[in-house]
Image (tube, helix red, strand yellow):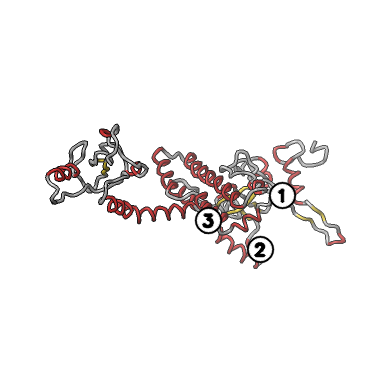
């Protein structure tokens, strides 16, 4: 066919000579008329590779014809490196001497900048956790400090959009990648559609929940890819679990939890002490942690001394009172018991209005 068309068969003598057709398309993609100055316009071919392999037939056909190539990688894009150029495979075959001075200066600066960008793939637990924290910080910014900008970008009239957190602590709203399956797990699709008809706070909480699940998916994707063992996966989860979730940050639960924890720590002991002091002058009506009454010398006789002796020991096991133990008093027989002996915890005691020990459970309270 090539010979009949008076075209040289070219390399490997393919019918129609694909190499020749490529070269003809690229080198003379457009021809200007003589009235406009003549000359030809060189095309910029775009080739989609399979798994980034530039050694297949089509790329190797085009590379010898062109004056260079720029190789983009999806993995670099997801790590926040933009433009996502693989500086090792990207080449310019235009001689340095043939370049303009201004171009030389720009290229020199850009080359240094690109070479300075770290491009390691997270392979250890610490590197995966660092990647997780960077993406998490970017997502939190989108849903808190940059919420107005994020809200505007999620127009329900647009196509399906995803919220991406990047390792360099930035974020972006973009269309999902077209490759199937994708290089990394994809976030929730169509967050902009969910915005329509929802309160802003509820919508942000929904996006936060999906973002949390996506972060975990990405982290454990790296763990599976690089063969993390049981202990490594456990350690990674423990490190992640130390951080509050994005949903907790967006909904304000983190601050509330801290306030409640501080209040509990500051007032827990004083609250118990106050109850103990208020209960000692009269017979207890509620089961709380109390100090058994101390022995007192008065004129009431031997009976009160015996009662005091009984109050200083556990009515179940007979052991003496310890300051670091939880005790509870029976409202019927007015004897003291270890909480562990009668299976009563401080939390459970707070909800008991009148406590009866196992021996008095069938008796009435004294008047």
- From this viewpoint, is residue 263 visible? yes
Q: Position of residue 295 (x, y in %)?
A: 16, 49
Q: Residue furthest top?
A: 362
Q: Name the residue at 43% across, 43% down.
A: 237
**Residue placed under numbered mark 2 in the picture:** 99
Q: Quadrant of residue 320?
A: top left
Q: Are marks 2 and 1 in contact (CB under 8 Å)?
A: no
Decide which of tag 1 and tag 3 comes sooner along the chain. Answer: 1
Decide which of tag 2 and tag 3 comes sooner along the chain. Answer: 2
Q: Name the residue at 67% across, 48% down.
A: 196
Label 2: few (<14), some (14–19) or many (≥20) C-alpha neighbours in 10 Å:
few
- From this viewpoint, is residue 163 visible? no
Q: Residue furthest bottom?
A: 101
Q: Position of residue 207 (x, y in %)?
A: 58, 48
Tag on residue 294?
Answer: none
| On screen, residue 228 above or below 154 | above
Decide which of tag 2 and tag 1 comes sooner along the chain. Answer: 2
Q: Secondary structure at mark 2?
A: loop
Q: Quadrant of residue 344?
A: top left
CA gap, disc 1 and disc 3: 28 Å
Q: Position of residue 234 (x, y in %)?
A: 41, 41
The answer to whether 76 appears left or right of 287 in the picture is right
**Residue placed under numbered mark 1 in the picture:** 157
Of 127 and 95, the residue lying toward us: 127
CA gap, disc 2 and disc 1: 46 Å
Q: Nearer the viewer, mark 2 or mark 3?
A: 3
| On screen, residue 242 above or below 111 | above
Report the quarter where the C terminus lies.
top left
**Residue placed under numbered mark 3 in the picture:** 169
Q: Nearer the viewer, mark 2 or mark 1?
A: 1
């Amino acid at each position: 066919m090539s010979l009949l068309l008076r075209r040289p068969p070219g390399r490997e003598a393919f019918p129609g000579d694909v190499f020749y057709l490529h070269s003809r398309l690229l080198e003379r993609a457009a021809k200007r008329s003589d009235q406009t100055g003549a000359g030809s316009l060189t095309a910029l071919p775009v080739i989609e590779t399979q798994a980034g392999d530039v050694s297949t037939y089509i790329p190797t056909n085009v590379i010898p014809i062109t004056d260079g190539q720029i190789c983009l990688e999806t993995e670099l894009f997801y790590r926040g490196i933009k433009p996502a150029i693989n500086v090792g495979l990207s080449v310019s075959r235009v001689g340095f001497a043939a370049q303009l001075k201004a171009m030389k200066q720009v290229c020199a600066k850009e080359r240094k900048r690109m070479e300075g960008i770290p491009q390691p793939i997270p392979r250890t637990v610490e590197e995966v956790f660092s990647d997780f924290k960077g993406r998490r910080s970017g997502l939190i910014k989108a849903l808190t400090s940059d919420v107005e900008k994020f809200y505007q970008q999620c127009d329900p009239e647009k196509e399906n959009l995803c919220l991406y957190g990047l390792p360099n602590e930035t974020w972006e709203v973009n269309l999902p990648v077209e490759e199937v399956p994708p290089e990394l797990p994809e976030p929730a699709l169509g967050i902009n559609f969910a915005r329509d008809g929802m309160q802003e706070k509820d919508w942000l909480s929904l996006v936060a929940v999906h973002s949390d699940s996506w972060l975990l998916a990405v982290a454990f994707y790296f763990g599976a890819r690089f063969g993390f063992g049981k202990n490594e996966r456990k350690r990674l989860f423990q490190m992640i679990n130390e951080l509050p979730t994005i949903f907790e940050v967006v909904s304000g639960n983190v601050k509330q939890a801290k306030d409640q924890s501080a209040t509990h720590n500051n007032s827990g002991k004083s609250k118990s002490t106050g109850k103990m002091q208020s209960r000692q002058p009269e017979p207890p009506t509620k089961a709380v942690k109390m100090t058994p009454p101390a022995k007192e010398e008065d004129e009431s006789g031997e009976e009160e001394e015996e009662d005091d002796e009984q109050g200083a020991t556990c009515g179940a096991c007979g052991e003496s009172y310890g300051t670091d133990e939880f005790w509870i008093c029976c409202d019927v027989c007015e004897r003291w018991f270890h909480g562990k002996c009668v299976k009563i915890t401080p939390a459970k005691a707070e909800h008991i209005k009148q406590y009866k020990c196992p021996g008095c459970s069938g008796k009435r309270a004294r008047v």
